[in-house]
Amino acid sequence: MRMRLRPNVLAHPSPTTGRFVLLIVMVVGGIGLLSGDLIHTSVRYRPFLNAIRSCLDSVPNDTFLRSCLDSEYRITAWFQIGGAVAMVALSLLLLVLTPAWIQRRHGLKPATVEGAQARVAELAAEVGLRRAPRIFVGPAGQRDAFVFGLPGRYKLVLPKALLVRWRSTELFDPVVRHELAHLQRHDVPLAWLAATVWVAAIPVLVAPMVLSGLRLDFGLMPDFFVRSALLLGVVWLVRRQVLRSREYDADLIASRQAGGWRPLWTVLQMGTGKPRGGLSTLISNHPTAADRMAVLADPARLPNVSFVDGLVAALLAGTLAPVVRNMLDNIHASTATFLWSGLLLGPVLGVAVGAGLWRQALIDHVNGESKWPGGVVAGVVCGLILANLLDFSHFGMETGLGFTILAVFFSILIGAAVTTLSASTGRIWADAAGRLPAGRRGWVVGLVVNSVFFGLALWALQWTLVTVQAAIGGGVDLTTFVIGVGGQFGPMVFVALVPVVVTMVALVLRRRVTPVPAWLLDGGPQTYAEVSRRPGLPMVLLSGAVSGIVVSAAIYIHRLIAGSPIDDDDRLSRYLLWTLTATFAAIAVSFMAVVLIPRSGPAIGLVSGAAAAIIAGLAIMAINSFVIGNGFDLGFWWQVTSVIAGQWFIGFLIVAPFSLAMWPGTWRDMPGWLLGLVSVLAAALVSVIGVGLALT
Amino acid sequence: MEDENELIAELTQAALTTAAPDELVVFEETAQEYFADPQAALTAAKGDAAVGFGLELAMLTPAALAIGSVVLQAVMGMLTEHALTAGGRALLRKVLRRQASAAELGLTVAQAQHLRLVALQRAHALNLPEAQARQLADSFVHALVAGQ
């Protein structure tokens, strides 16, 4: 029987840091920008209206209207930025005042037991804190230990019962070490900033309501109130949930620093605190002692990235993205604002969800487990849907049922696929753990990859929605869709670039047999983990490339049978045959990897499918230009290849979540020749069907 | 009243010498806090602080003071005529300070057992763990009859 190893779950940064940052950024950005916008509407309603009237009279057509209104939009942007700055200033002010408030509220005073202060200083020096926190005590009813204060001037509150037992190292040290771990991880400013932004949000939200009330305009109030209350409620719950997660990390850090987990486990076993259940578990700042003891004994039991984590992160990031885009648009109207807002918020979602999935993959790698990411995938999907329904950027405007349906559809499509893909690339990356560097260099890759990945996904979600909405508004049939909108999807392939590169590197790295690296273990002997090593990169690329060539061969056979096109309609139908056959064949290639290779299937399917789509496009063009003799036109080559790649990627997004059904599969390796064979057969089958339909 | 509180404090301090000697360092301030608002001292403040430990570690002193007050009442009712003539409270104070023999209080074995029972009942009412309740009850009786 294989020995169960203790993974070092602290080897990668906790996703809770990302969740804290997301929460703070969301409240400051979302509520601040929104409030600024609404205040602008209240105080500059008439000047704005006058500017529109004046521009409508002076500009020759709508094209110039926006540039004529630029200065007015910039004023709106200043109001939005002002709202955010007010939020930041108010939050920081409250943060500075918090220590004095806590001291007064809890009746705290400096402790006079010198031995205890000296012991805390010793322990603080041991863990590398530059300044030891000063010990404070409260009244006799104060029975818990906690830390508060500002960086560099932290204060440690100890219950008197513990303070007087400072010589009892088995009781005093674990508790103090736990609190010092909170300080090391900067939990105090994060936790209190998350609280103060919440408090600061209330007056900032009330301000526009008061201004509207003064104008006797109550139209927006119910909508505004409900959305704001929902958002603040979510933020409040998230703060509690994140704080609970940080407790596990603080426990694990403290036990590592103490050289073992048993002392802290024993303190928790003393039955401190009352057992909880139901609602109190949801709103508590601490997990139950039983849960903490379980994680201390076996860090692999650290709660997985959950449905709630995905839901909240996606809801907050998805809600904020259009608000940020709106603000950027007011500063300078451009389609690049879609990308910028995505890239600005992507890192936060990447850290909160993606980095968590990658950390989970590493933990599972140590013990050969395969925790199912279906919960977090569903959470991200639901979060994005809710964010689109709440849509703060269209506040007070009717968006229409069609747009809502589209938003829900693309939220499901992109949310499910991107999260599944992140989990899958994390898996394949974890397979290469033995060859990854320790420390920051190791996890920075995951952080950057997921940041870019989720950033591009947020961009794609906003951008695709607007593009498709515009296309549908113009009225499209299948032909127009493939020629026009199909090409528009080309840029979405950028989302695929990051995981493609990561997967290719990991496919190479994982080939060499290496033990679980020491940095990934919490002590104990090094041993070999069960790792998937096949297929390798050459066979993955080859299976895609050969499939692409099979498609192009089928297209050529069709040309031989059908002869030259006789008119423009015929030429158009040939174009559709090329692009659609190649698209569906590449999707089939991806699908084979997704369903045949548990866990890392989507990542591998992304590479093989991309190879199939690109090679099919290039090979079809090569045949068209050099074999059939239609001449070389680089623009046409690019158009056909990018349309196939773009459409394939949309299809890939649909098939990627199928891997959730295969996730628990017990086999790890898939021989490269077998993957190649089924991929080529699938591509051939699709090609035969496509060509057959075209010939009948 | 202040005189009685002082006596309760002295009796409790004597009991804590064996039951929780560590807590004597902060006894004076805790006793002041207890006499100012006994219920507040006995009740846990709202816990679950952010970035806390999730601990609920209570001092024994407030509970001991609550027990001390009922024990003192019981003792005063048991003192013999001789003890009362000798100035009951003053005598009790001397006994607690070991300036007089515990025998001068004239407590019988049955009375000592009754005192233990009184202390134990109050400890149970305060929800102290059984072992701690017994230890505290014994400590009070020991403080009153030691050397008798």
Image (cartoon, coloured by chain):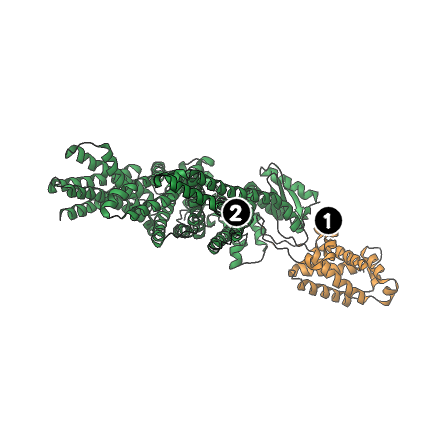
Q: Reply above or below: A615 against A650.
A: above
Image coordinates of residue B83 in percent, x first then y, are 85, 64
Q: Residues within 10 Å of mark 1 (few under 14, many from 20)?
A: some
Q: Quadrant of residue B102?
A: bottom right
Q: Amino acid at mark 1?
A: Val
Structural crowding at the residue carrying mark 2, measured as other residues with C-alpha within 10 Å and reported as few (<14), some (14–19) or many (≥20)? many
Q: Colour of chain A?
A: green
Residue A364 percent coordinates (x, y): 42, 46
Viewer-side residue, A574 vs A554: A574
Q: List the residue tagged with mark 1.
A: B25
Residue A174 in sight from this viewpoint: yes
Viewer can see residue A523 = no
Chain that is orange in the image: B
Kind of residue sitting beneath label 2: Arg
Query: How far apart are labels 1 and 2 at the CA level?
Result: 34 Å
Image mark 1: chain: B
Q: Is residue A26 above or below residue B40?
A: above
> Looking at the picture, does residue B122 appear above or below residue A642?
below
Label 2 sits on residue? A246
Nearer the observer, disc 1 or disc 2?
A: 2
Relative to A469, A52 lies left or right = right
Quadrant of the image occupied by residue A496: top left
Q: Quadrant of residue A187?
A: top right
**At 64% from the left edge and 56% from the top edge, which residue is drawn?**
B44
Of the pair A132 and A581, the residue shown nearer to us: A581
Q: B101 above or below A606? A: below
In front of the other: A343 or A30: A30
A559 left or right, relative to A424: left
What residue is rendered at 18% in x and 48% in y?
A689
- Image x and y of residue A415, in percent: 37, 48
